[in-house]
Image: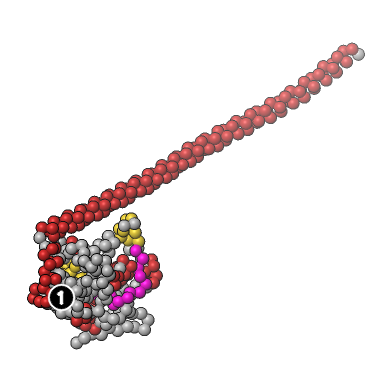
Amino acid sequence: MVTPLSWSSRRNVLPNANSHENLSSGLDPTRRSSVPSVGRVLGELPTSAELQSSDVRVNTAEGPNRRITPIEELKLAIERYLPPPGEFYDQFTMYTNFDEDYFNIRLDNGGSGVIMKCVCCWQRHHGVPRKKCTKLCSVCKTPSHPGTECPKMYVTLRWLKDHQSLPHGIGMQVRPTPSEQAYLVVAGVLKDWKDLEGPVVVNMDHPLVKAFYEGKAPPHEILNENVAPALDDMSFTDRNNQAAIDEPIAEKNGSAVSRKATKKRRKAAEKRKVSEMRTATEKAAERATEEAARKATERKATIRKLKALARKAKLRRLDGELEALKNEGAAITKEMLTAQAKHDAHRRRYRQWEAELHELLEEIEDDTTEEEV
């Protein structure tokens, strides 16, 4: 039984996680981003506020740890951006598997601008429109997608447009642009990534992802397979064009191709090594910066603590000195009071002595007067 998608009146909501068994069969591949994701909260799309406040950062050619702003609305349904089930070729690592000009649709045409390759089978153009092509695909080595793009190729819409093609085939998955990938990371469909052209890693715990890959092989990127740059397949060759097909194959096979492929692999390995060394250097610098910041914070905290202790010690010392001054002042005041009391007692004694002296002088004067008489 097919479980169709349903939406609430307030926000886009996926069916219950327990009913995702046949979810992929109920998805409309032409529907835009109204197909909800189960991100932070099950069944909800990221809000505009969440997208604007997101902090998805990757290493780019402009510098490390650059923020990628998520797109506001996806052009395709969310499941169309997932990597193809099973083995596939990623846009940014196809050069490790194919010749440098393998997907050049105007190759060996003298710059005339005429398309020389079929974008369905990726062989030399055989005079049949893409939609009617039934030749063996030189990429996936099968005739399983007549008239449509190879489902083993995981490329962006821009890449398809540059190669005069569009994702007509429902089975073809489309690689998200950085802004679309950032949206899917915020939605919880994809995991965070480090380098701008790094691999797309799905979150297999996400119900929509589980539903898409249910009964299928998990995605696996093909690297360094050294696929020969064949332009056609013998079992599907038009015998009238046999000579025109064999000649470019012979020219591109042999030691020159082997050396070029080896050079390609070495270059890719060196590029990965440089990227890893740069990442390790950046991480070491980040750790050193974090350690220096931590030590600076600890040093500031220690200085603040020592200053606080010094202030407390100084305050205690000043309190002790103030108390001593108070005691000394009290002692001086007591001595002053004692001295004042002695002074008052001396003055009283002096007045009493003065009065007695005056009385004695009067008596002497009276005695003298009586003797004279």
- Lateral position of residue 259 relative to residue 185, left or right: left
Q: Name the residue that disc number 1 marks.
A: 216
Q: Residue at x 25, y 79 (%)?
A: 168
The dominant secondary structure in magenta is loop
Locate residue 120: give its quadrant.
Answer: bottom left
Name the residue type under label 1: Lys
In magenta segment, residue 70 = yes
- Lateral position of residue 125 relative to residue 344, left or right: left
Percent position of residue 125, x then y? 19, 74
Above or below, comparing residue 293 to residue 226 in the picture: above
Percent position of residue 108, x then y? 21, 66
Percent position of residue 18, x then y? 22, 79
Q: Under tag 1, what secondary structure? A: loop
Q: Residue at x 57, y 35 (%)?
A: 330
Give the position of the C terminus as an image quadrant.
Answer: top right
Way the structure is coloured: secondary structure
